[in-house]
Image: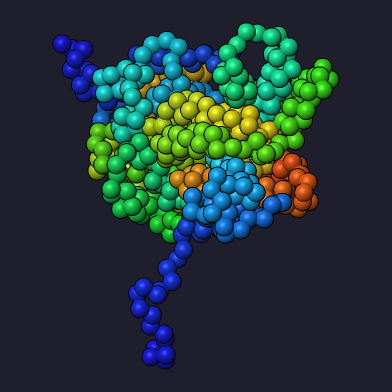
Amino acid sequence: MNALVLKLPPYLQIKRVRPATLLVAALLLGVAVAIQGGAVSVTGSDWLSILGLGEQQGGAGGAYVLWNIRLPRVFFAVLVGASMGLAGALTQGLFRNPLADPGLLGVSAGAACAAALTIVVFSGLNLPMPISWRVWLLPAAAFGGALGVCFTLDRIARWITPGSIAGLLLTGVALNALAAAVIGLCTYLATDEQLRSLSFWTLGSLAGGNWALVALLAALLLFAWWRVRQLVRAMNALALGESAAAHVGVDVRHLRSHIIVLVAVLAGFSVAWCGMIGFVGLIAAHLVRTWVGADQRQVVPMSMLTGGLLLLVADTFARTIAIPAEIPVGIFTALLGSPFFLFLLRGARGRIG
Amino acid sequence: MLMKTSMETDLMRLDCVGISLGASSFGPFSLQVVPGERVAILGPSGAGKSTLLKLMSREWKPASGQVFFKGQTLTTWNLSDLSRHRAVLPQSSDVAFGLQTDLVVGLGRVARAHDPQLPDIVEACATLAHATHLLGRRFDTLSGGEQARVQLARVFAQLWDAHDGLILVDEPLAALDPGLQFDLLDSLDTYASTRNHALVAILHDINQAMLGFDRLLLVKDGKLVDDLPCSQQAVPALESLYSISLSCVTDIQGSLVITPMRKAVRRLSAAGAIA
């Protein structure tokens, strides 16, 4: 019997594939598919051309689309998704709660609200300001809005109902409603041109992606990742509860404020450049947790990868499903994410309160 | 000179420590704990036992007075350093997200950046806490008793390679069955005595306190009413602490067994009602 067992040489033995490896492979495959798909088809000669090897130097037609639109868009989608996945995992770890997400808790809405106020009110003031600063105005405002909501949440939710999931989500509902009201007011007061910019934020789209933003976001994500790597061990301790985490030597207040600033940076910047794209962070972190367990040292990096993959898939569908038109990806993620959230609530039955 | 020697012998010292929470105020508490000592805190519900323990663990900062740990003011300790000398076993044991039990036990040592022996220590702590069979399971799938064992193993891991430390225990055993209570108190005692850790525990069972501890701290109405060694002489103080009568019997093994008696007044009136 034993003789029948096929003995493979060591290099052919199938080792247990690590989930992270699997995710990276899926992401690479996704990127490859996403680059090929779109209104303008991309051929092999276009690839050679953008690498400087083809006949049409400088790029025209397909090569132009590939280099200036398709590639930055695809990378942008992956990076934005990754920062949303990271923000989602951090928020859930911070509030010790699998239902927390920057979108649900109003952090994204707060960022969009600040951006809307900037577009409508600030531009009306006609302040003398160097042109080079204007690029940073919206991201800075969105970051400020996200940070404000994060701290408010942290304060109010702990003050009203310490440790309660319901209290946290209800505070998020209230902040979301407030932000929506301010955005609505801005919409009402906006001129036609401002209205166009505003609808961009409320719908959410990755169409603004370019190489400069890709580089910037990549740098931002690298920085966040570097910070998070130092925090993940302590974040595991946070699951014990705040007092127990302090007892095992974690400076909880320090940890909380660091996570809050990171979440605000990630959520604020992705909102500033892409508008409100919901549910990616929530779903990514949740999928990862059911897959590899709750250890934050794995959940956090893998939520980044999963978030990137999810948003890439969503964006690829959004821009190819109705060629040549393009559905805003925020609508797409909300369409898929809301039922998923209801599904999660079903699982949390009896634990909310 | 006298001050200095007292600081060297004390592991923890509370000097007139008080705190106000809402309408009720607690303290002033003044007491010492010496290394290797086993102290039981007893008192009626709501008397301030947990408050006292939280002041000792630095969870709450005192409004007045000072707490010294190893001769240094408790609030000036670096949290990570403190965690290597003082562990706390909390009353409730809720762990979010259903972490794996071995990870929960290992979290006792999260403050150590480099910890090569971690897997061995986790294993040894689980063995001591009777939790070896629970390793590898999700914490949220465990029963109350199993969760208490895992939390105890976490506390063991925290002070595994330390000496002369302090373990604070907030009545974690109240909800467990008597056999398990005995087992866990026993392993806690073994663990603490081999490392000369002092043990301060809130208890509800007078006999547990009398059997396994050296000293009693009696807390009532937010005050420390008595601080006395465990012996039969403590019985009158315990009677007034709980406002009940206690009967003392010496069992076959020679240890003291204390049981509450019904109040004489009630029995008389009941007898009267029958007559």
Q: Quadrant of the C terminus of chain A?
A: top right
Q: Is residue B157 visible?
A: yes
Residue extending furthest left? B1
Where A145 sits versus A329, above or below? above
Q: Is residue A101 left or right of residue A239?
A: right
Q: Is residue A29 left or right of residue B258?
A: right
Q: Is residue A342 visible?
A: no
Q: Residue at 38% of width from left, 32% of height from top?
A: A249
Q: Position of residue A309 (x, y in %)?
A: 59, 50
Residue closer to the observer: A2 or B68: A2
Q: Position of residue B243 (x, y in %)?
A: 52, 25
Residue closer to the observer: A266 or B221: A266
Q: Position of residue A187 (x, y in %)?
A: 80, 22
Residue closer to the observer: B112 or A214: A214
Q: Is residue B140 left or right of residue B170?
A: right
Q: Is residue B267 left or right of residue B211?
A: right
Q: Quadrant of the N terminus of chain A?
A: bottom left
Q: Residue at 74% of width from left, 41% of height from top?
A: A328
Q: Quadrant of residue B234?
A: top left
Residue closer to the observer: B58 or B225: B58
Count numbered badges in the picture. 0
Q: Residue at 39% of width from left, 21% of height from top?
A: B226
Q: Residue at 59% of width from left, 23% of height from top?
A: A135
Colour scheme of the rendered structure:
rainbow
Q: Position of residue A278 (x, y in %)?
A: 69, 39
